Image: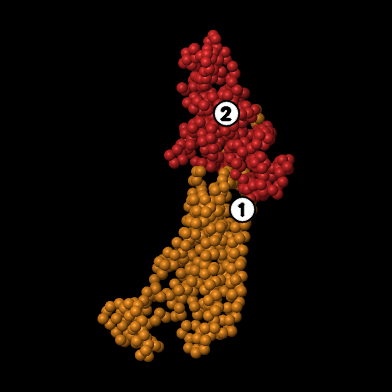
Chain colours: A red, B orange
Amino acid sequence: MTGMPEQSLALEASGLGKRYGSTWALRDCGLSIPEGHVVALVGPNGSGKTTLLHLAVGLATPTTGRVRVQGGLDAGSLEALECVAFVAQDTALYPSLSVADMLHLARNLNTGFDSARAEARIAELDIPPTRKVGKLSGGQRAQVALTLALAKRPRQLILDEPLSSLDPLARHDFMAALMTAVAEDGISVIFSSHVVAELERVCDYLVVLASGQVQVAGEVDDLLTSHQLYTGPAAQADRLAATLPVVRDRRAEAQAHLLVRTSGRRTEVPTGWETHQVGLEEMVLAYLRAPAASALPGPRELIGKGARP
Amino acid sequence: MTTAVTESPTAPTRPSRPQLRALTWVTWRQHRTASAGLIGVLLLCGLLLLQNGLTMHADFRRLGLADCIPGHKNPACPVRIDAFHHDLDLVTRLTAIIFPLPVLFGMFLGAPLIAREFESGTHRFAFTQGVGRTRWLVTKITLLATLTIASAGAFATIVIWWYSPLVPSHGRLGTGNLTYEVYGTVFIARALFALALGIFAGALFRRVVPAIAATLAGWVAIFTVTFVRLRSHFLTPRTVINAMAPGSNPWVITEKWTAPDGHTLSTTEISTVQNTASTTGHTQDMYAYLAHQGYSYKATYFPQNRFWTFQTIEAGSLTLLSLLLLIATVWLVRRHAA
């Protein structure tokens, strides 16, 4: 890896905040997501996911701080709009236009739009080009939106809740199409989702937002190795919890299950206790249930800083 | 390491932005229905004018009304003018029909332009394309303004032809004459102003129906204020003393009769004095007669030949106002943060 240029960032936010009226939708958000990842942005409804993504594509302007994409381009600048494709929630396509017209529209609004590729994909998906976008099924509409976004030949793709209105089959097909594109084009992807199941299969970087603040951010592998489930006697649980950053503390009768952020360090496991790996979904849910806990790796050297109580 | 994907975003050779032709297609595709509807309405009204105009022009010639301009001495005129009454009624009615046409540009072309994007959420698509929202908006505004000016201009030409025989006899200027409102550059400028107002209201309210309502209300308000208050102050009127305002159909702004004792006559007193004057046989120059009696008359007025000056001032102001609204719109959309 010697001689490798400083890794450029897909998304970089510092002190980023957005206030609507008197409510902060996003507050003091700091993120440094390297290029080349498939990033899942998860969090409950109203946690600020859409706000963050809208800030990243220039649909909203920050109240505080700044956000840059794709190696330092100001979010929403013409340079950024050219290399970052955005698929809005519920696709935001024109329902009264036919698929062919929608394609033509997108071609005329972008330089270097790959019409042939878009048309081939639409044909492959068996979507009649003459059909109105409003008459398509949710899955088809999502596929058309993805097709338009990819035909821009972006270096980064940002999708806001692409799966929320899709049935399981359409969801599977959509993710398959997205993953193929990632593999073929090597683009960075950031997508938001309030569905935490099956994230492991699709994303390799995770950001958890809660109440407008970044709670967890990091590569999935790192996060998984830095969290352990401690199972042992409930009587000793308090003593153990005092020495380790506990994300979730669940006790049942004599047994305690502590989800601990070990920060990757080998820690001495007390006698009478067992440790297990945790799944991504379990970990995410634990964080969502414990809004006060956080795991923010930030710059690498800071890994190891314990979770704030 | 892959070195293929090292194209720097700040490379000097940036790809050119989508060309005007591409954005023209976008504008046409998204606004063709409203444009076609508006042009259809204009065509329909234009046909009405054409049909009425042909009849009216023929009647005008047949009756020889060109000789019957105010101040004529032709004894046959009262009968001829009477025979023309039906045509004049139709002219008044058609004027009322075409009067509101310009506001339709604002309500159906202008107001939805931005409001519908926000209302349906499609601005999230439109504003995140490579072209950028500013160029998208400026191109759309330019093209739709051009369309508005061209179609309203074509219609105004028909109106000018339609009304042409009546210009010498009825004039085009004055509060009692609504021709001014549907004529010439003012008609075109009102359409442009409506469009700009609609686009601006759409950017402000981001909802189609409130934007349409605001456009209608704003347009009517500007028209009313201009008609009732502002227009007579565009220029300094001429003054006439102890004589009738000269020329045919002068637009009289103020009139004042003063009695020999110095007090200003009320409307009823004026008619009494005038009736007395006419019964004593001084119909030919009542003003001179009454002046001799010690009354004095003072009026301010605009002659008909100031018509195009008024039109130019009003159309120019509306165009300037439209430009300001459009600049404000671009500013609003650029700084918009949903």
Q: Is residue A57 visible?
A: yes
Locate residue B256, reporting x and y percent: 34, 77
Give the residue drawn at x 33%, y 85%: B290
Tags 2 and 1 in contact by the CB under 8 Å rule? no
Q: Is residue A28 left or right of residue A220?
A: left
The residue where tag 2 is placed is: A206
Give the residue drawn at x 69%, y 42%: A118
The residue where tag 1 is placed is: B30
Give the residue drawn at x 58%, y 37%: A160
Query: In terms of depth relative to the viewer, which is nearer, A1 or B168?
Result: B168
Q: Is residue B288 above or below residue A41?
A: below
Q: Is residue B171 left or right of residue A38?
A: left
Locate residue A10, reporting x and y percent: 57, 33
Which of the 4 quarters of the picture holds residue B262?
bottom left
Q: Is residue A36 above or below residue B199?
A: above
Label 1 residue SS: helix
Distance (Cα) linking label 2 and label 1: 39 Å
User: Which residue is at the far front?
Assistant: A253
Q: Is residue B326 visible?
A: no
Locate residue A131, reporting x and y percent: 69, 48
Query: In terms of depth relative to the viewer, which is nearer, A36 or B108?
Result: B108
Q: Quadrant of the N terminus of chain B?
A: top right
Packing grade of label 2 (10 A; few <14, some 14-19, many >=20) is many
User: Which residue is at the far top?
Assistant: A271
Which chain hosts label 2? Answer: A
Q: Amino acid at mark 1?
A: Gln
Q: Amino acid at mark 2?
A: Leu
Give the residue drawn at x 69%, y 45%: A115
Label 2 residue SS: strand
Locate residue B188, reporting x and y percent: 53, 65
- Same chain? Circles 2 and 1: no
Which chain hosts label 1? Answer: B
